[in-house]
Image: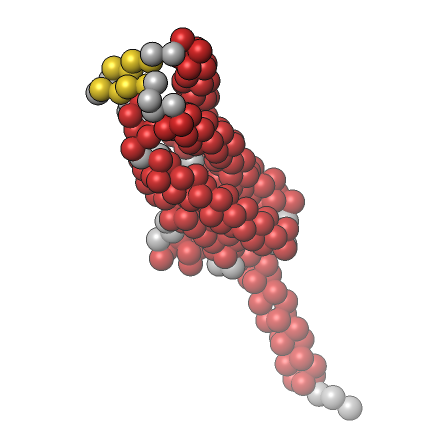
Amino acid sequence: MRSIVQRLGALSLLVVFSFALVACGNKEADQRKAFATFLQTRVLDKPGIRVPALSAEEKASFGDYAQHYAVITDFNEGMNKSEGQPMTQIIAKGGLRSVSDLVSRRDDIKAAKDGLAGLRTALDQQTTTADAAHAQLKQPDDLKQVYDKAYEKTVTVPSTTFKEVFPALDTMFDSALAVGSYIEQNKSKIQISGSTVSVTDPAVQTELNKRLQQLNSQSTAIKAAQQKLQMVVRGA
């Protein structure tokens, strides 16, 4: 027969174990609350896209949920490195300041157009990776509601908006190359001196004006897409 001491000892172990479970449960709840509060106040409540780096203290307070935040930070860091900076370089390389650029800088325009394909592929891959990681996350409903909103704001919306710039740029580069080729083909009838363009053939002048007007309208579309992207990023 077990002694009363043995029984009390077993009971005390059960009590300690029970307390340990409660303590563990509270720890997860505290981590979840801290993470949800961070997402709400530091990401959702801020204008534009804000993805602040976590301090060592914040990582510790979030526990395993810090890895959930890494899905967002990894995407944004990758997007800035693979798309944001190269896109600025592509726009600068393919920028046109005069009609003469359409002829003298055709290689730059072609290189800028080719560079877009790589950017688009990289963005698609990064978005797919982030979406797959997001889908695998296991989160209680209260956290999931906040996290999904933060994910949409910092991953889905910028990715979708960024992609809207690609078609406009691609079309503009195609038109610029076509106009450059047209000028080259009719160089005996088209004289360019600085910002002045002289055309001796009325039919060629009409066609050239048509192409240049189309190119200008496409430039306007690009500016609109860029402004939309800036509004998403800056929140203004």
Q: In this view, does 96 lie above or below 118?
A: above
The answer to whether one can see residue 94 in this image is yes
The quarter holding residue 141 reads top right
Q: Which residue lies furthest to the bottom in this view?
A: 1
The answer to whether one can see residue 228 in this image is no
47 or 60, nearer to the observer: 47
Judge from the rendering whether residue 150 lies leftward or rightward of residue 57; answer left or right.
Answer: right
Q: Which residue is at a point 42% across and 15% down the rendered structure image?
A: 204
Q: Which residue lies furthest to the right in this view?
A: 1
Judge from the rendering whether residue 79 lies leftward or rightward of residue 20; answer left or right.
Answer: left
Q: Which quarter of the figure is the N terminus placed in? A: bottom right
Q: Where is residue 121 in the image (x, y as percent from the top left)?
A: 52, 48
What color scheme is it? secondary structure
Q: Residue furthest front?
A: 188
Judge from the rendering whether residue 66 lies leftward or rightward of residue 109; answer left or right.
Answer: right
Q: Position of residue 147 (x, y in %)?
A: 55, 43
52 or 204, nearer to the observer: 204
Judge from the rendering whether residue 33 lies leftward or rightward of residue 41; answer left or right.
Answer: right
Q: Which residue is at a point 26% across and 20% down the rendered structure image?
A: 192
Q: Which quarter of the figure is the C terminus placed in? A: top left
Q: Position of residue 18 (x, y in %)?
A: 63, 67
196 or 94, nearer to the observer: 196
Q: Which residue is at a point 58% across and 41% down the rendered structure image?
A: 148
Q: Position of residue 165 (x, y in %)?
A: 47, 31
Q: How many labels does the image show?
A: 0
